[in-house]
């Protein structure tokens, strides 16, 4: 199988480069990343990236200064962007791990998404990503998400 290939998601926005202040909310099958973003027409908005059918996440290191050390850096990973990884080695790693308990190949087909931010990187294996934007204050958005029924 081919190696990791990172491609742009063309979602119409990118994480604000200075201080996007990301916050992650997650349960067993859904992850929501809230961050400050810039739209393609240069408007500052609050982005709500929802990952449904979430299998696993990684959030934190590396920041943008250490991004060249990320294993995907030489495979198309870019600064301050929303991307997808085709032929994910992370997904293959989970399949190999699962094989110890379940010899049949898993019926998983999640996609590998990655969002590079100023002080962190977010990665998610999920069925899909949906990004909404709002002009509401971040505190309002986060409060609504926390109060949302599961």
Image (cartoon, grey):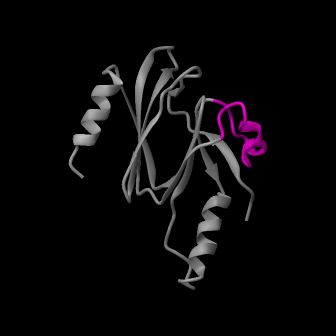
> Which span of residues is magenta-colored?
62-79
In the rendered image, the residue lying farthest to the top is 42
Residue 114 horizontal/vertical position (percent): 58, 43
Residue 67 part of the magenta-drawn span? yes
Residue 55: percent from left, percent from top: 47, 60
Q: Is residue 113 magenta?
A: no
Write down the quadrant of residue 144 in the picture. top left
**Percent position (x, y) of residue 110?**
51, 59
Residue situated in front as seen by the camera: 129 or 96:
96
x, y percent for residue 143: 26, 34
Number of marks in picture: 0
Q: Is residue 140 left or right of residue 51?
A: left
Q: Say if residue 82 shows up in the picture.
A: no
Q: Residue at x 52, y 75 (%)?
A: 106
| Residue 117 can be seen in this image | yes
Q: Residue at x 20, y 48 (%)?
A: 149
User: What residue is at 35 percent from the left and 26 percent from the top?
Assistant: 138
Residue 49 to residue 54: above or below: above
Q: Nearer the viewer, residue 86 or 23?
A: 23
Residue occupying the point 31% across, 27% down: 139
- Quadrant in which residue 96 is drawn: bottom right
Taken as a whole, is the magenta stretch helix, strand or loop?
loop
């Amino acid at each position: 199988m081919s190696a990791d290939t990172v491609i742009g998601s063309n979602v119409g926005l990118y994480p604000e480069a200075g201080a996007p202040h990301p916050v992650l909310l997650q349960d067993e099958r859904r992850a929501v990343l809230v961050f400050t973003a810039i739209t393609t027409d240069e408007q500052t908005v609050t982005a709500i990236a929802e990952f449904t059918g979430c299998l696993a996440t990684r959030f934190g290191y590396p920041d943008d200064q250490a991004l060249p050390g990320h294993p995907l850096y030489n495979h198309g990973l870019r600064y301050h962007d929303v991307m997808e990884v085709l032929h994910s080695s992370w997904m293959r790693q989970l399949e190999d791990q699962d094989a110890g308990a379940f010899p049949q190949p898993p019926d998983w087909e999640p996609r590998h998404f990655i969002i590079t931010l100023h002080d962190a990187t977010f990665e998610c294996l999920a069925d899909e990503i949906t990004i909404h934007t709002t002009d509401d204050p971040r505190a309002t958005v986060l409060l609504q998400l926390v109060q949302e029924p599961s």
